[in-house]
Image: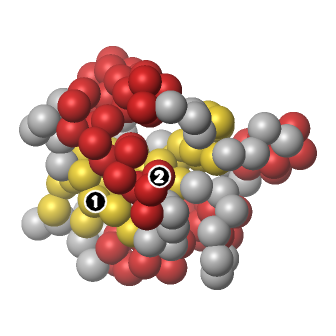
Amino acid sequence: MPKQIGILIVEDDLKDQKFILRALNKADENLQIEIAKDAECALEVLKNGSNPRIIVTDLNMPGMGGRGLLDVLKSDDRFKNIPTIVLSTSENETDVDDSYSRKANAYMVKPDSVAGYQKVASLLNEFWLKEVKLPRASTN
């Protein structure tokens, strides 16, 4: 049976990993969180049976990056229904438009404070995990 995790965070910056992890744990201490350092690691996590309810990915990372990850996720029947939220430092409208054209479910700009990360974590937890009715996990 696939391991059910709440959120898969795909983030290459260790400081950002720490901030979002701390904020998510504060929002819900029982939330199962997994972190992948890049898109390729995220795909390995998924292919090894982890089954997150949502994926939060940075956009600009080494390797295939968030854009490539979106392309793979949204074209694979096993992963295409997992809500994928881009969390990026970029406020560039081209990046926003491109992310949505690649079927991102939401685009958020990374905050620049601990309080900002707490707000992002609260929104992710309250909206995506508690409020929204999500599809059942694929068992393919």
* Mark whose residue sits in front, 1 or 2: 2
For the point 85% across and 41% down, the residue is 92
- Kindly indicate the quadrant of the structure image that contains residue 90: top right
Q: Is residue 74 visible?
A: no
Q: Percent x, y for residue 82?
A: 44, 49
Secondary structure under badge 2? helix
Q: Percent x, y for residue 110?
A: 59, 39
Q: Is residue 28 visible?
A: yes
For the point 29% across and 37% down, the residue is 24
Number of numbered tags placed on the structure image: 2
Label 2: how many Cα within 10 Å (few below 14, some 14–19, many 20+): some
Callout 2 amino acid: Asp
For the point 44% across and 56% down, the residue is 15
Quadrant position of the C terminus in the picture: bottom left
Q: Tell me how far mark 1 sits from mark 2, CA to CA.
A: 14 Å
Which dot marks residue 93? none
Picture colour scheme: secondary structure
Secondary structure under badge 1? strand
For the point 78% across and 38% down, the residue is 91
Q: Which residue is mark 2?
A: 16
Is 22 situated left or right of 44 in this image? Answer: left
Which of disc 2 and disc 1 is earlier in sequence? 2
Callout 1 amino acid: Glu
- Kindly indicate the quadrant of the structure image that contains residue 132: top left
Q: Which residue is mark 1?
A: 34
Q: Percent x, y for residue 7?
A: 32, 48
